[in-house]
Amino acid sequence: MTIDEFEPEDVLLEISRKLSNVSIHKLPAHGGTVEKDALPTIKYLLFSSERDQIKQSIRLLRRYLTQGHSDESSVNDILALDILPRIKELIGSDLGDTIKFECAWIVTNVAAGTTEQTNAVIEAGFVDLLLDCMQQKNGSLDLKAQAAWALGNIAGESPNYREELMRKGFTHAIVKVLEDVYQDTYDESQDLNYPGGKIRFPDEDCYSNVEALLWALSNMSRGGFHVAEYYQNYLPMFKVFSDFIVFDYTKLEIEICWGLSRVLYNMHDVNAFHQRNHISDELCERLSSLLRDGVPKVVVPAIRTVVNITSGPNSCVEGLLRTPLLTSITRLLEPQAPNEIRKDAFLVISNLAAGNEDMIKHVIEHKVVMNSVVAHITVPGHTYSNNPVHWTPTLSNAYYMKNDEWKVTKEALWIIFNIVSLGSDSSVWELLNEHPYLPRSLAAVLNYIDLPLDVCEKNIEAIISLVQRSNKWIDNRFPNGKNPFVRDLIENGVHTALPCVQQVHENENLRDLCLKLDKLLVASEEDVVQTASISDVAGMASAFGLPTIVEIKSKSNKRRVIRGLEDGDVRLIENAVGNLCI
């Protein structure tokens, strides 16, 4: 089972929904500013039968849009000329790819504008025409990439447009062009011998076109419609993203990782996709290296991709376990890492800890990671004293982004909860042997008066699970008949904290957890063997007001996925509205 982790889109980190082409790429350098009063003359030239005059007109229109950075007013000036039918006619003509490319460039920048401007392109009938350009066997790569860019801007306008483009085969068309480029350039790129073994494209034009194509495919990776019905479209999308992630360009890495992250979320719980999809060792290695060495703009989508891989079936995670993934993300667990990145890094660990025994041991055996996890079971920006019990703000407390820091604390608690609930006896014993002060840390956090509700609930669940698991070790590990962890929790104020917690948060679920923990501690102190037996049987546990092992374990057997505003199947989004973790 999984839970949605909704993250509002950050315009500084997300790939843009729409992009104008305001570069002078492939535009002649000569010529000055194009004035607005020259537009009627330029329109006249556009309708000429002379190829050179047509080309001159289109390039002047491009220059007019470029000098205005394709802002709303300059695009409106172009639309006011009523030349879209002529542009459409030229794209469908036999005047050659150069003129078609120039026309597609203009359409791209109009479609990058307001909703009304984008709709003008759609209503003029450009969608099918641009798709035809992409599917022409002998068409130039420049033209195909520009057509994809224009359609990518339409895709960014709304989920309905994305679904229609998906239905018309837009993603298949992009994938086919990218596959051809990959086959033509990969071997040559490997032979170029760039420093550090980096793989680059043989020329700049190739890179620019691939960038446009991958951006368009990433934009199409946004969800918001019935994506599960199109799983066969997402399989080749995932494959082509995986292929191109080997190329060493920051912009491509950003777009590819956002694309991968979105595809995985859209296909979450779509079994037909996961049964056919292949997550290669090469992709896992590359993601691990990006997390180790990448800049923040790359790390954000890369870590979300890894989160969404680890939220899937165990078979999808195996490749990650063969990489130094946990070592790569240790730098992201440090306090100086941006809060959102740090939270997502802990979420990766939490998802692994919600897996099978191999995955849990993979986490436990990484000492640096586990030291960081346990160190984050604290009150952010405070130091603890147990005599008397008190949390004191540090000098840096005023600078803490407390809400974000509490999210990280909650992730650390999820990790402990998952390990203790799902791990084998030997794994849980290893955790507690390595970190004997863990029960005291859990008790200390519970004694903070302003503990957020969600952190409080997860902390109590972790304590309950810890007591239940350790109660079963009385015969072989605790021969004196007492559970030392229970005594630790009581001596560190859990009993006295529980009534305060209930007063601060008038919440029925929390009240139930507090009552069950209180009774569990008392019963465990009085007769630990009987308490352990009762916890195994649902009916008996309920009669005594105790939590069952099955009840707590069911709460830990959950992995989480991260999505943006329009990611995922619209039916899942609608169903999850009341259950988002924001």
Image (cartoon, grey):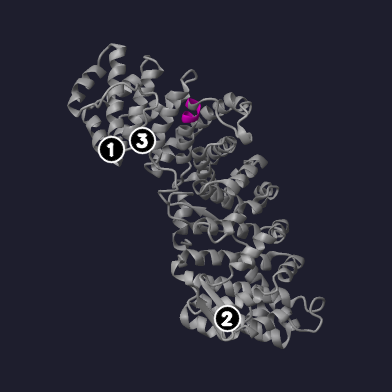
Q: Residue furthest top?
A: 50
> In what quadrant of the picture does the N terminus appear?
bottom right
What residue does disc 3 label?
20
Q: Secondary structure at mark 1?
A: loop
Q: Are marks 3 and 2 in contact (CB under 8 Å)?
A: no
Q: Which residues are magenta?
A: 205-209
Q: Secondary structure at mark 3?
A: loop
User: Closer to the camera, 411 or 151?
Assistant: 411
Point out which mark residue 328 bears: none
User: Residue placed at 59% from the left, 43% from the top?
Assistant: 273
User: Residue placed at 68% from the left, 59% from the top?
Assistant: 363
In front: mark 1 or mark 2?
A: 2
Point out which mark residue 71 bears: 1
The amino acid type, in three-letter code, at marker 1 is Asp
Q: Real-space Cα distance between discs 3 and 1?
A: 9 Å
Q: Are marks 1 and 2 in contact (CB under 8 Å)?
A: no
How crowded is the residue under tag 1: few (<14 C-alpha within 10 Å), some, or many (20+)?
Answer: some
Q: Is 451 on the left or on the right of 30, as rendered?
A: right
What type of secondary structure mainly makes up the magenta span? Answer: helix
What residue does disc 2 label?
385
Residue 206 magenta: yes
Q: Are marks 3 and 1 in contact (CB under 8 Å)?
A: no
User: Residue placed at 51% from the left, 64% from the top?
Assistant: 407
Pinpoint residue 167: horizontal percent, then vertical percent.
46, 36
Pinpoint residue 158: horizontal percent, then vertical percent.
38, 43
Above or below, 3 relative to 322:
below
Q: Earlier in the sequence, mark 3 or mark 2?
A: 3
User: Residue placed at 51% from the left, 58% from the top?
Assistant: 4
Q: Residue furthest bottom?
A: 526
The amino acid type, in three-letter code, at marker 3 is Ser
Q: Real-space Cα distance between discs 3 and 2?
A: 57 Å
